[in-house]
Image (cartoon, helix red, strand yellow):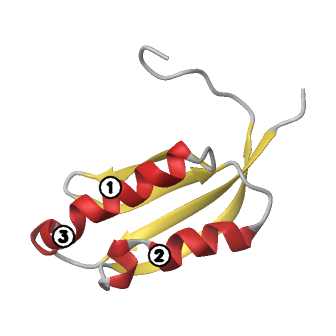
Amino acid sequence: MSPRRLLALGYEYVPHIVERRPPFREAHLAHIRSWHERGELVIAGALGDPPVGALFGFDVADRATVEEFVATDPYVVAGLVASTRIEPWAIVAHRPLGDE
């Protein structure tokens, strides 16, 4: 079985993200939902408690698509993301989550 290939996007948030995000949170979550509904974003979520970053998995072939997501994400536009990283992700094991 060949590994499933995704592109992983990692965000590192700015300090005090929880206090700074409220004006942009709903738009950020709507952005994520939109890309998920398009079928390009397959998994997404914050890392840490409180969050220090986020991780996204894209089922797309080209990096430019992920770069478009980043450029149009309200958190990025608002300066709430300190850094990003896009890397190929070879998935060798997975299962549906929860009730899926």
Of residues 32 and 84, the one drawn nearer to the viewer in this rendering = 32
Residue 82, given in percent of the width and then of the height, sits at 38, 82
The residue carrying pointer 2 sits among few (fewer than 14), some (14 to 19) or many (20 or more) residues within 10 Å by Cα, namely: few
**Residue that badge 1 annotates:** 29
Give me the residue at 23% from left, 59% from top. Answer: 26
Considering the numbered disc 3 on the image, is that residue within a helix, a strand or a loop?
Answer: loop
Considering the numbered disc 1 on the image, is that residue within a helix, a strand or a loop?
Answer: helix
Q: Amino acid at mark 1?
A: Leu
Spatial CA span between label 2 and label 1: 12 Å
**Residue that badge 2 annotates:** 72
Spatial CA span between label 3 and label 2: 16 Å
Q: Quadrant of residue 29?
A: bottom left
Spatial CA span between label 1 and label 3: 11 Å
Q: Is residue 42 visible?
A: no
The residue carrying pointer 3 sits among few (fewer than 14), some (14 to 19) or many (20 or more) residues within 10 Å by Cα, namely: some
Q: Amino acid at mark 3?
A: Arg
Left/right placement of residue 7 relative to residue 70 reads right
Query: Is 54 located above or below residue 57 in the figure?
Result: below
Q: Residue furthest left?
A: 19
Residue 89, given in percent of the width and then of the height, sits at 71, 52
